[in-house]
Image: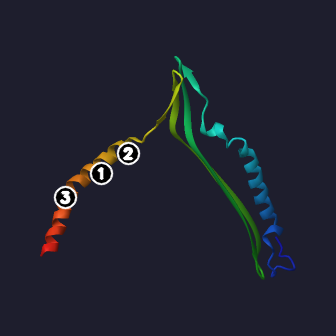
Amino acid sequence: MTAPEDADQPVPLNDTSAARTSVTMLERLADKLGGRASVAAVYGEPVISEGVTVIPIAQVGFGFGGGAGREVGSAKTGEGGGGGGGAEARPLGFIEIRNGTATYKPIRDPWVDVAVPLAALLLGTTAPKILRAIAQRARH
C-alpha cells in the first residue's frame, strides 16, 4: 500500500473505508437481530400437558461493538476495522397456568439455597463473640 500525498494530514474517521465498513456491518447486524430481540426471545413457546400450561421465561441480552482506525504519519499508513458481539440467554423461571390461575415459579440457583443459610449460621455464631470482644476492649 502506498502512502497518499497528504499522509501527514489527519483524516476524519467517517472518511475511511474501514469506518464505513464497520458501521455498515453493525447496522446490518442490528437489522437482522431486531426481529429476534423481542418478547418471543424472553417468553418461550407455551407447553401444554394434562391441563397445565407452562411458559418458560429467560433473560436475554445482546451486545455489539465495532471500531476502525487509520495510522497517519510520514512513512506509515494503514487502515483497520473490527467488530464483535455476543448474546446471552439465561433461564429465570416459568409461568404455570393451572385451573385458570397463573403462578410464576423462579428457577433458583442451588448454591443460593446453600450459601444463604450457611452465611446466616456463620454470622449468628460469630457476631455475639465479636460484639463481646469489642465490649471488653471498650471497658479497658
Determine whether, in the image, residue 56 is placed left or right of residue 23: left
Q: Residue furthest right?
A: 5
Q: Which of marks 3 and 2 is nearer the N terminus?
A: 2
Question: Could you tell me how far apart the alpha carbons at marks 1 and 3 are, in whole angstroms?
Answer: 15 Å
- Report x, y in % for residue 106: 47, 37
Occupied quadrant, residue 22 = bottom right
Identified at 59% across, 27% down, the residue is: 46
Mark 3 or 2, closer to the camera = 3
- Three-letter amino acid code at disc 3? Pro
Question: Could you tell me how far apart the alpha carbons at marks 3 and 2 are, in whole angstroms?
Answer: 25 Å
Q: Residues within 10 Å of mark 1 (few under 14, many from 20)?
A: few
- Three-letter amino acid code at disc 2? Val
Q: Disc number at residue 112? A: 2
Determine whether, in the image, residue 134 is placed left or right of residue 61: left
State the residue position of label 3: 128
Question: Vertically, is 12 above or below 61?
Answer: below
Front-most of residues 100 and 83: 100
